[in-house]
């Protein structure tokens, strides 16, 4: 199941039932879990680990050095969870500082030509569509969907089950469950209701999220005032949203929605 043209270091650790396609290169220090499928012309660089059951398609490059002019040779890592699909031409770069890591959670789906920069942290079930890009140190919550061509500025956080529209640019944090309109500079225009339903968020929690959204983006209150009201609501959804906003270093995305 390993093609004769593949170049595999003796110091790489390859699990059971792994297929490796033609002309792929696996460097020293790489770990590939059981039942993985590595396509042709794939590069897995040193300090990279793949969990069990991953698929890496043609031309993907995982674990390359960070695109950071301040990078000095250091032992840093890429960790990819179990069950991930990494499609054609995807690039994932390792951390830029000694001992740091770029981490992809379980069951993530990175479509063709997506890019994950150094020190990014992706939760479980994240989907990045074709040509989407994450700058360094971006954090993406579980189940978030980043549409094709979208660009996320470095150090931005994307909340759980958020949806980023195609060809949009986010320079500020996107709160959980929120939806950024396509082709905008991070303008939040609604909630990812379909995504919440698919993820099993119940009707009461969805209603609570709608109330929170109105406080943030429709009521006319500033963010500080809205967070105070959210805290008074109580409940898991309010706590999640409040903690996310309070933890923001870049501020949260705005909206063009008007009162009423």
Image: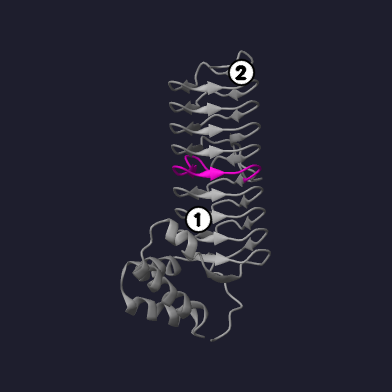
Q: Is residue 255 visible?
A: yes
The colour scheme is one colour
Residue bearing the label numbered 2? 6
Give the residue at the far top of this rendering. 4
Residue 17 locus on image (x, y percent):
45, 21
- Where's residue 210, x and y in %? 44, 74
Is 131 contained in the magenta span? no
Question: Is the residue marked by circle 1 packed among few (<14), some (14-19), or many (20+) residues within 10 Å?
Answer: many
- In the image, the segment drawn in magenta is 97-114
Which image quadrant for residue 156? Answer: bottom right
User: Is disc 1 placed on a helix, strand or loop?
Assistant: loop
Residue at numbered disc 1: 144
Q: Main secondary structure of the magenta part?
A: loop
Q: Earlier in the sequence, mark 1 or mark 2?
A: 2
Q: Circle 2 sits in a helix, a strand or a loop, which is it? A: loop
- Asked if residue 43 lies left or right of residue 158, the reply is right
Residue closest to the eye, 35 or 101: 35
Q: Is residue 249 visible?
A: no
Image coords of residue 161 (percent x, y): 47, 59
């Amino acid at each position: 199941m390993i093609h004769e043209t593949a170049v595999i270091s003796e110091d790489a650790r390859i699990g059971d039932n792994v297929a490796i396609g033609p002309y792929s290169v696996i460097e020293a220090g790489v770990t590939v879990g059981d039942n993985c499928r590595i396509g042709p012309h794939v590069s897995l660089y040193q300090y990279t680990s793949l969990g069990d059951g991953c698929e890496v398609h043609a031309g993907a490059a995982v674990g390359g050095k960070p695109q950071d002019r301040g990078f000095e040779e250091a032992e840093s890592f890429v960790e990819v969870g179990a069950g991930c699909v990494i499609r054609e031409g995807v690039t994932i770069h390792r951390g830029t500082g000694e001992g740091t890591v770029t981490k992809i959670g379980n069951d993530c789906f990175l479509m063709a030509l997506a890019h994950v920069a150094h020190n990014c942290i992706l939760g479980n079930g994240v989907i990045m569509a074709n040509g989407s890009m994450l700058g360094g140190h971006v954090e993406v919550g579980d189940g978030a969907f980043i549409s094709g061509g979208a660009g996320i500025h470095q150090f931005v956080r994307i909340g759980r089950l958020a949806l980023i529209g195609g060809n949009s640019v986010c320079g500020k944090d996107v709160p959980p469950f929120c939806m950024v309109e396509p082709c905008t500079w991070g303008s939040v225009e609604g909630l990812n209701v379909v995504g919440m339903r698919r993820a099993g968020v119940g009707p009461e929690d969805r209603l609570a999220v709608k109330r929170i959204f109105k406080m943030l983006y429709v009521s006319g209150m500033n963010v500080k005032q809205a967070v105070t009201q959210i805290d008074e609501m109580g409940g898991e959804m309010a706590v999640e949203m409040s903690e996310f906003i309070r933890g923001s270093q870049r501020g949260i995305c705005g909206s063009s929605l008007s009162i009423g």
